[in-house]
Amino acid sequence: MSNQIFQTLKELPTTLSQVQCVLHKHELLICGGNYERAFGHCVVKLIDNNKDKNQITLLSFGGYYKHTLVMKYVSVWTNDNNNYENKMNKSKKLNKSNNCNEWTPFKDNHNHPIIIGRDNDNYRGMRALVGGINNHLLFITYFKNNISVFDLNIFQFIKHDTLPTIYSIWYHCFVSKPENKQEQEMMKTNKQNYQMLLFKQKTVLSIEYDEDNNTFQFHKLPVCKDITPFCAYACVCINDVVLSFGGYSGINDISKSVFKYSIRENKWMTFENTLPSPLSYCVAILREEDNHIHIIGGKDDKNASVSTHMKTKVREWDPSQLSKNEIKCIVEHWIQTLKIKLGWINDFKHSKTNDSINFFFSVFFNKIVKMKDFKIAHSLLLGRSH
């Protein structure tokens, strides 16, 4: 059954574990690895709405060998096979002249190198998120039980605090709650409480950060007994659920289990279906376009790094989740059925994130049709009216 749920893709060109992965359009960017100088580190995508949409900025920092590097990435791929070689050579020259696709030191506005992390901070196995109302804050959780806030606009730490746990925090799950993005759609001029989740063995926390007062609030959540022995699992947050895959509890105890935490219901679930084989120190990332989760690299039950790349449909683990294309189909069906004439609907349909689409549903369509009744949604996909 697991082999049917997980589709094995072409193997990676090398074995990898403890990597970071970032999605850019249709590309998966894999950064670092346990045989590179960058491992146990974190790579985040910096958000700048004024930048070229074909370019993203990546920030890599922390890890066993503490570093702080930045890269402007522009795609190296092209769909034009006729002039592929010429375009690639031209792209390489352009990227080199613009310092694209190369890791360079992170610098402030005065061209001074910036190192994120104090001398005594242990950033191995740390995790970080970009957030805040203007996406200018870097939230960092790290060993032993620390959380810090780094302001990317002024290149300084603005907050250090201690997590309410006696257990060591590293190689953990640290994700942003979906309501953060939804509130940003409506509150661009106001500050807010930024909300996060942290999982690590017996530590399960909901974290709220108040931008106005620069304070944290911590709330302990229910613990799942099945997942408490493990760390170093791959995790991904999709709307109101967090999925985790595999995990490490010792060299001879590698998990192949899959767990789900429902934010809305505040409940855990352990699935009968599992990974095809035990896996730890892997990474998971969601590709929203087709609603597939990609699981990359990791270590097997013999503590050997693997070159595995597989994917699984989100709806195998949460039937309520719909892909962008499916949501678009539902929107078009509802527009036609209800004869809604809205001049801005085309802009809405081309929204780049599921979050803004889901936010629209919850505010507007939820008043007309119960969006939580996904049986209706699926029947709409099949063309049956209600």
Image (cartoon, rainbow, N blue to C red):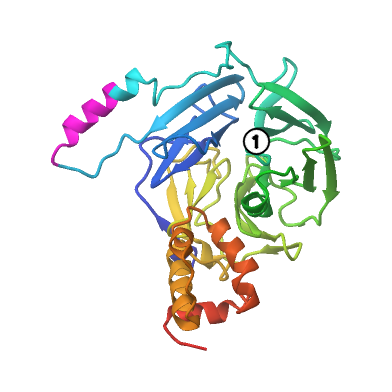
Query: Residue 88 colored magenta?
Result: yes
Question: Is 370 left or right of 76, judged from the image as shown?
Answer: right
Q: Is residue 123 above or below residue 135?
A: above
Query: Residue 352 colored magenta?
Result: no
Query: Mark 1 Cα within 10 Å, few/some/many (few <14, many 20+)?
Result: many
- The residue positioned farthest toward the bottom in the image shown: 386
Residue tagged by mark 1? 128
Give the residue type at disc 1: Ala
Question: Is 26 left or right of 138, judged from the image as shown?
Answer: left
Query: 254 and 70: which one is in front?
Result: 70
Q: Name which residue lies at 52% across and 21% down.
A: 37
Q: Name which residue lies at 49% across and 76% down.
A: 340
Q: Name which residue lies at 75% across and 50% down.
A: 228
Question: Is 160 left or right of 5, judged from the image as shown?
Answer: right
Residue 194 point in image, percent of width and height: 73, 45
Q: Is residue 354 above or below residue 85?
A: below
Would you identify the image quadrant in which residue 97 lies?
top left
Residue 359 point in image, percent of width and height: 61, 61
- The residue positioned farthest toward the left in the image shown: 82
Report if residue 182 is visible in the image. yes
Report if residue 304 is visible in the image. no
Count of picture labels: 1
Residue 280 point in image, percent of width and height: 58, 44
Residue 108 point in image, percent of width and height: 59, 17
Q: Is residue 120 above or below residue 48?
A: above
What residue range appears in magenta? 82-93
Q: Please tell me whether mark 1 sits on a helix, a strand or a loop.
A: strand
Q: Name which residue lies at 29% across and 23% down.
A: 94
For the stretch drawn in magenta, the main secondary structure is helix
Q: Is residue 6 above or below residue 309?
A: below
